[in-house]
Amino acid sequence: MVTQITLTTMAANNCKLAVHMNAGDGETSYTNNSAPQKIGITKSLHVLERAIEEMITDIGFPKVFKIADLGCSSGPNTLLVISHIIEKIEELRHKQKISRNSPEYEVFLSDLPGNDFNNLFKLLPDLYEKLDINNPSTKCFVSGLPGSFYGRLFPCNSLNLVYSSYSLHWLSQTPEGLESNKDNICIAETSPPEILEAYIKQHRKNFSTFLSSRGEEMVRGGRMVLTFVGGKLKDRASLKQDQTIQIFLLGKTLAEMVAEGMIKKADLHSFNLPVYPPSKEEVEEIIRNEGSFNLDKLEEFILPWEVYTGNANLDRYGWGKFITNFIRAFSEPTLAAHFGSSIMDEVYRRYEKKMVEAGPKEIPPFPNMLVSLTKK
């Protein structure tokens, strides 16, 4: 195999919020606590395969396939997807008895500048070994691309296939006008109506920009497959049953530490997580109104916690540890930047206690949104 690794920067792309996962490969790292995302990705691979098949039917086999994973993070999940994409294309090439040499693959792994690209690059030998086993002649060129996907990242008409998993529920910034959301760090039952509207407005702006940017960057007939956390926050009656209870309890933990003088009240009142899980109806409406893509598939699925834990027979304490490390892996960097890193161990120690007390029956698993699109 011919391989090349580069790190590219995009000076024109302005990132308003530095969100990233826990770096490295320690106990609370994203690398070691992204099993739920991996399960969701695996459950969506059939849609990705179908999108690739239809793309090949429409545009054939170009000499160079240009593939982008947007919001790649730093764990092994992105390489699982990339290897699956390349293997699927190679399978179709052999099935159709294409005699010419295998196409070259240019792969872009993109995330915000704070992402741990070094850890991601350390995992690349595993990808190359896997591809060598299946197709030694494959030529694959991998680049790291720091920048926000809420804006342009690539030249016009340059990408064939775009993939993104568990990133698009993150907003580019905390919505404006959240001053009245005191003692909450997300949309909650006690949030005033204007809080929900502020999040909806920010998500609509961000997702529309994401689609229009990819609309310029992708070739006609190119495919885009997206997975992210969904929800029904517009239905306030469902907030108790929604996955935001996990974040709500994190806010309760911080509020208790305020009462004990460990955190300043002003710090809590000025903090909200920039996360919004949209409903199917919201996603469909934004795609239709933006107009760059045909919507091929839009579905939602929910998996029980037992699936995410590998059907392990965890007691309440084991489950509490599992869910705490899962939440910590993606929330700690943002919390530490605002409240300081020195109290993070105490925050998540208390949070774990709440998870143990609640148990899996009181903490519903998060809905997964799966979207497949074709560039018009």
Image (spheres, grey):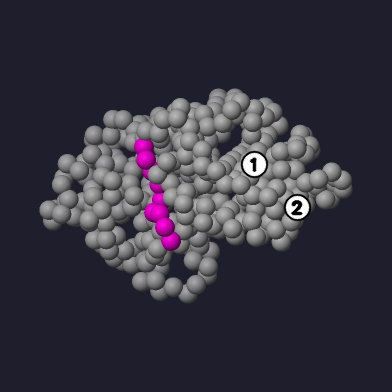
Of the numbered discs in the image, which one, if any, rests on residue 285? none
Tell me what residue is drawn at x 48 percent, y 42 percent. 111
| Relative horizontal placement of residue 152, taking residue 238 as reference (left or right) | right
Q: Residues within 10 Å of mark 2 (few under 14, many from 20)?
A: some
Q: Earlier in the sequence, mark 2 or mark 1?
A: 1
Residue 284 lies left or right of residue 190; in this view the side is: right
* Number of marks in picture: 2
* Viewer can see residue 57: yes
Instruction: Give the amino acid type for the residue marked by disc 2 in the picture.
Output: Ser
Above or below, 245 against 322 in this view is above
Residue displayed at 68% across by 43% down: 105
Looking at the picture, tell me which residue is in the foreground, 87 or 108. 108
Q: Nearer the viewer, residue 106 or 293?
A: 106
Q: CA distance from mark 2 to mark 1?
A: 15 Å
Q: What's the magenta region?
A: 17-25
> What residue is disc 1 on?
106
- The prevailing secondary structure element of the residues shown in magenta is loop
Sort mark 1 into few (<14), some (14-19) or many (20+) by Cα contacts within 10 Å: some
The residue singled out by tag 2 in the image is 137
Pick the residue in front: 44 or 234: 44
The answer, for residue 42, to whether it is visible in the render is no
Label 1 secondary element: strand
Report if residue 177 lies within the magenta region. no
The type of residue carrying mark 1 is Glu
Q: Is residue 295 above or below residue 39?
A: above
Identify which residue, 168 or 122, lies in the foreground: 122
Q: Position of residue 24 (x, y in %)?
A: 42, 57
Residue at the (29%, 60%) spot, across then down: 348
Q: Secondary structure at mark 2?
A: loop
Q: Position of residue 234 (x, y in %)?
A: 42, 38
Residue lying at the far left of the rendered structure: 261
